[in-house]
Amino acid sequence: MSETDRHKVRRLYQSGAKKRKEAKQRSDKEAEVVSKTRRLTEFITQLPVPQSDPVLSTSSVPVLEDAVENSLEATLKRPSH
């Protein structure tokens, strides 16, 4: 164990000025790190959609819904074993 009793030693508190100074240093260091950190959007690339192709310019959601409905109907029409 430690040789000093923690109940007999006075705790040293920092002054308000020292707390503010250290808080400013922490925020400055954090701002520096954030400025050096790359953004997530830099890692994501978007593929350009050509405007001349009408199939790609329309929404693909109805096509996917039709495909799901067709596969569901085909599954239901299969004879069960």
Image (cartoon, rainbow, N blue to C red):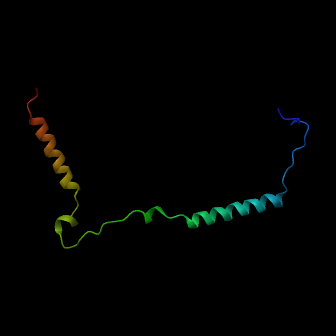
- Left/right placement of residue 43 relative to residue 52 reads right
Judge from the rendering whether residue 37 lies leftward or rightward of residue 73; answer left or right: right
Q: Residue, x 66% and y 63% (percent of image)?
A: 29
What residue appears at the point 17 percent right and 68 percent down from the top-left corner?
A: 54
Quarter assignment of residue 61: bottom left
Question: In terms of depth relative to the viewer, which is nearer, 5 or 69?
Answer: 5
Query: Viewer-proximal residue, 13 or 60?
Result: 13
Location of residue 35 in the rendering, given as x and y in whole percent from the top left corner: 57, 67
* Residue 6 in picture, x, y percent from top left: 86, 37
**For this rendering, which residue is in front, 12 or 36?**
36
Quadrant occupied by the N terminus: top right
Q: Residue furthest top?
A: 81
Q: How many marks?
A: 0
Q: Quadrant of residue 21 in the image? A: bottom right
Outermost residue, bottom side: 52
Tell me which corner region of the image, top left, top right, bottom left or bottom right, holds residue 26: bottom right
Q: Looking at the image, is 8 positioned above or below residue 15?
A: above
Query: Residue 49, percent across and down?
Result: 26, 68
Q: Residue at x 12, y 40 (%)?
A: 73
Taking 40 as reference, is 27 left or right?
right
Q: Quadrant of the C terminus?
A: top left
